């Protein structure tokens, strides 16, 4: 009883506690007082202990444990990348390298200089940012520039796109998680930008079919329009292709409500800007007119690019329902129909093509796999969507392979030179030099035999 | 379960008796996973340019597959029957020209190590097996761990160190150890009771593990008071502050030392 | 902020279908999304995005359904009918015991709360 009383009094009387160690007695005869209360040595516990009800909760809500967004936000903060070492002097622009390689005689056979670390040119970097080509967990914060690895596959795609631009080649990039599909797409985009092409990028395609946007039935086309989506796509289109679009003069007079566009005073960019005067219900006709204008011009080639393409064709039905509660198929949504028609070849441009990239966050549906020739026909597959197959059958698959041991070696050397490998991982040989070969072997093993994302993780997020 | 009995279960018994002619005249449904040699199919059916969109009964004709099944079963039966004798794995599975399956195996196991191999083994035995993890880091991870979720604690620690690496551009593990060494107190005042009611406070030196534990405890406490949503960010921010000498932990250390000096007369030498 | 539909306040941040089935007795998730489809709302629409006209048409849809007290009355009538014909489950409802053969030694709190002739919930 006495001990309890003492304990209670010691809590009640202001902070008189001397440093208390777990294991030592709580009550202390010391008369020492401290300006700041010292915490107990017990480790930080978020939960209020039993019997201490009514304790004040911390004012800041800290969210759920393991909140990934907070970490990503911190990492993406500009102060970090500004403090990072600059590699500008060491690296060349990717567009120039690809250009040089594609015009060279030996073209793709010469593998000596690949893979190569590259950066983007300032112009295309800006445009890529507008498109949203850089994703969260790509570890771009490690350096000031957006660095990427130029690989043989990127060259192959760029070669295909330039060689047969009039036939409008269709390519889909596949591969395992973290292999660099989105990066490859960004590289191709930056190359296309340097070649003066208009990039028609569809952002966040999953949101097109999952019921995020408002929709209404267009009675003339019998398709469902999504005005909010058209607005979003136009914003990306106008920002990332501003100069090109403003150099295209309109070929016709257009009137939407009170908004008038004439060839004398307006360029295509003005139309894509979608002024507030244009009523919402006419967005789809503006969209059709913009496509028509792009088809008429012969100045620039036009490319469709979609990241996370497999999320769009994961299921044949969308989340939308019609008035009779029937599922609306994805090809009934006008924007998806437009993209699929382009992929099929029903919508054609004088020059251009289609570059798609899959995402490992979504599965590749059996319809997709069968349509692009990754899988044979399974006659018992009930989910097979025949109409979707006809849209995708001309698409060519480019599968990204894992990096070889030599390529991982180059990357390791590069990480080592920039001081990103911790000393714990480095083992010295007898004459005091770094045992690079051992390090490379380790990293090759840890990167699951050449997965780029796993490699970066093994260098920067693995301390055990 | 043997392959034969598995096959017997999958196929209807009646069909096994007639083996001379293909018995399947009507369409037989078999799940694709059960199809014999189904991996061989792609070479013939795959056609990238013109995929057969209209799936007809022809595509579902499995006559050939079933014939293959039956021939495989026949082959298995032949292998297992051993010319009419009862099946005995030791004799039936013997390689051609041998009576017993184990004879060859016995010979194989009687290999002798070469001199070089023995020498290598002795040198390797003399070497110490390296520790999997850094001892101090693992200790701190264990202190952070809640509800036995070690992987979660490791993730927090790895991310906090990653933040240190990004902000300070140094080797984070070295810096982490440096912080703990600088922050950890050397002495602690402990309360000793002698038999009667009287008790004395005596400063006691701390071991390395004890010292670092106390310092990391302070870091964790201060980290949990930070506003960031993710624990790894809170810890990372605190570690960065501590590296720059801007942490409460250093004040606590000074106070503990002050306290120890106050009671220095009680030290028994 | 809250949206008023048929005299009931629904949180503005709720999805429309979510708000409907959480608020009205007699409407489940599927019926709620059917209502949304009939009115022509997109699946991820929030309550605060509803226009005056859309609220009116939702109200109109709800008027055609047996919800709230009407739906409760249906349940009450069914219980009353079971009681009237003297069936076992009718008697169990009368006594306030579980109907489906559960033990009554320890638990059965839900049954005690709900199983009444004049059932409220």
Image: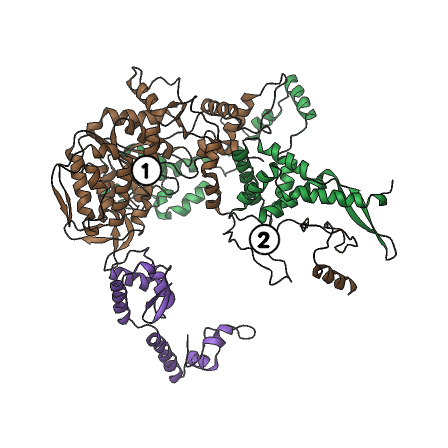
> Which colour represents chain A?
brown
Front in this rendered view, residue C82 or A4: A4
> How many numbered discs, if any?
2
Front in this rendered view, residue C118 or A34: A34
Give the mark nearer the N terminus: 1 vs 2: 2
Any idea which chain is the purple one in this picture?
C
Residue A146 location, x and y as percent?
41, 30
- Whether residue B156 appears in this view of the structure is yes
Residue A142 location, x and y as percent?
47, 32
Front in this rendered view, residue B25 or A130: A130
Residue A391 location, x and y as percent?
23, 40
The residue indicated by pointer 2 is: A46
SS of the residue at dot 2? loop
- Whether residue B48 appears in this view of the structure is no
- Which colouring convention does the figure follow? by chain
Front in this rendered view, residue A329 or B138: B138
What's the CA distance linking mark 1 and mark 2? 41 Å
């Amino acid at each position: 009883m006495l001990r309890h009383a003492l304990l209670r009094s010691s809590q009640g009387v202001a902070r008189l506690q001397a440093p208390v160690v777990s294991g030592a007695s709580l009550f202390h005869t010391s008369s020492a007082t401290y300006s700041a209360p010292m915490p107990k040595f017990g480790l930080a516990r978020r939960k209020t202990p039993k019997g201490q009800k009514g304790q004040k909760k911390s004012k800041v809500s800290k969210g759920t444990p393991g909140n990934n967004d907070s970490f990503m936000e911190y990492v993406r903060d500009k102060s970090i990348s500004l403090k990072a070492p600059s590699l500008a002097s060491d690296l060349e622009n990717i567009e120039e390298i690809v250009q040089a390689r594609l015009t060279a005689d030996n073209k793709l056979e010469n593998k000596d200089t690949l893979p190569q670390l590259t950066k983007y040119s300032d112009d295309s970097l800006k445009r890529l940012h507008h498109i949203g080509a850089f994703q969260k967990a790509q570890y771009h914060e490690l350096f000031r520039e957006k660095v990427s690895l130029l690989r043989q596959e990127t060259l192959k795609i760029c070669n295909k796109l330039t060689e047969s631009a009039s036939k409008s080649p269709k390519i889909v990039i596949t591969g395992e998680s973290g292999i660099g599909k989105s990066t490859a797409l960004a590289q191709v985009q930056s190359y296309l930008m340097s070649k003066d092409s208009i990039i028609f990028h569809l952002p966040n395609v999953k949101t097109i079919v999952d019921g995020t946007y408002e929709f209404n039935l267009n009675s003339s086309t019998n398709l469902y329009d999504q005005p909010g989506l058209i607005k979003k796509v136009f914003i990306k289109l106008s920002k990332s292709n501003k100069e090109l679009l403003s150099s295209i003069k309109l070929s016709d007079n257009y009137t939407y409500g009170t908004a008038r566009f004439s060839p004398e005073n307006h360029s295509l960019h003005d139309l894509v800007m979608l002024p507030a005067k244009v009523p919402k219900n006419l967005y789809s006709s503006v969209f059709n007119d913009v496509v028509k204008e792009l088809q008429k011009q012969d100045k620039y080639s036009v490319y469709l690019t979609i990241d996370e393409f497999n999320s769009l064709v994961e299921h044949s039905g969308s989340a939308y329902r019609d008035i009779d509660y029937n599922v609306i198929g994805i090809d009934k949504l006008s924007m998806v129909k437009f993209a699929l028609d382009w992929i099929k070849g029903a919508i054609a441009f004088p020059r251009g093509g289609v570059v798609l990239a899959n995402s490992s966050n979504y599965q590749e549906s059996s319809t997709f796999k069968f349509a692009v020739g990754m899988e044979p026909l399974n006659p018992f597959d009930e989910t097979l969507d025949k109409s979707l197959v006809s849209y995708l059958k001309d698409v060519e698959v480019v599968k990204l392979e894992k990096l070889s041991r030599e390529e991982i070696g180059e990357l390791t050397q590069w990480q080592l030179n920039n001081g990103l490998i911790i000393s714990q991982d480095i083992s010295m040989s007898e004459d005091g030099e770094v045992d690079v070969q051992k390090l490379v072997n380790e990293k090759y093993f840890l990167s699951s035999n050449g997965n780029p994302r796993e490699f970066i993780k093994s260098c920067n997020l693995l301390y055990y | 379960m043997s392959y034969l009995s598995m096959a017997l279960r999958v196929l209807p018994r009646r069909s096994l008796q007639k083996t001379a002619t293909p018995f399947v005249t009507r369409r037989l449904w078999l799940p694709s996973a059960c199809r014999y040699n189904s991996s061989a199919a792609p070479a013939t059916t795959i056609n990238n340019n013109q995929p057969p969109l209209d799936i007809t009964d022809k595509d579902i004709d499995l006559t050939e597959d079933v014939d293959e099944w039956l021939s495989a079963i026949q082959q298995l039966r032949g292998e297992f029957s051993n010319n009419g004798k009862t099946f005995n794995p030791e004799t039936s599975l013997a390689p051609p020209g041998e009576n017993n399956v184990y004879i060859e195996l016995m010979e194989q196991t009687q290999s002798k190590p070469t001199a070089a191999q023995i020498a290598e083994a002795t040198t390797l035995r003399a070497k110490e097996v390296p520790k999997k993890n850094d001892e101090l880091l693992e200790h701190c991870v264990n202190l952070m761990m809640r509800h036995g979720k070690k992987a979660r604690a490791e993730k927090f620690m790895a991310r906090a160190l990653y933040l240190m690496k990004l902000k300070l551009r140094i080797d984070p593990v070295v810096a982490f150890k440096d912080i703990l060494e600088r922050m950890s107190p050397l002495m602690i005042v402990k309360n000793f009771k002698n038999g009667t009611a009287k008790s004395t406070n005596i400063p006691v030196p701390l071991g390395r593990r004890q010292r670092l534990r106390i310092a990391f405890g302070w870091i964790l406490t201060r980290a949990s008071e930070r506003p960031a949503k993710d624990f790894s960010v809170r810890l990372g921010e605190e570690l960065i502050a501590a590296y720059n000498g801007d942490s409460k932990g250093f004040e606590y250390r000074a106070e503990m030392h002050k306290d120890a000096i106050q009671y220095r007369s009680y030290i028994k030498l | 902020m809250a949206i008023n539909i048929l005299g009931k306040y629904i949180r503005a941040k709720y999805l429309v279908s979510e708000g409907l089935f959480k608020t009205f007795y007699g409407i489940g998730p599927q019926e709620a999304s059917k209502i949304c489809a009939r009115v022509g709302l997109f699946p991820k629409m929030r309550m605060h995005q509803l226009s005056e006209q859309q609220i009116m048409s939702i109200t109109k849809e709800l008027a055609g359904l047996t919800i709230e007290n009407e739906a409760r009355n249906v349940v009450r009538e069914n219980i009353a009918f079971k009681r009237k014909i003297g069936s076992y489950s009718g008697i169990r409802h009368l006594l306030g015991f579980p109907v489906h053969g559960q033990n009554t030694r320890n638990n059965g709190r839900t049954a005690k709360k709900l199983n009444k002739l004049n059932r409220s919930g």
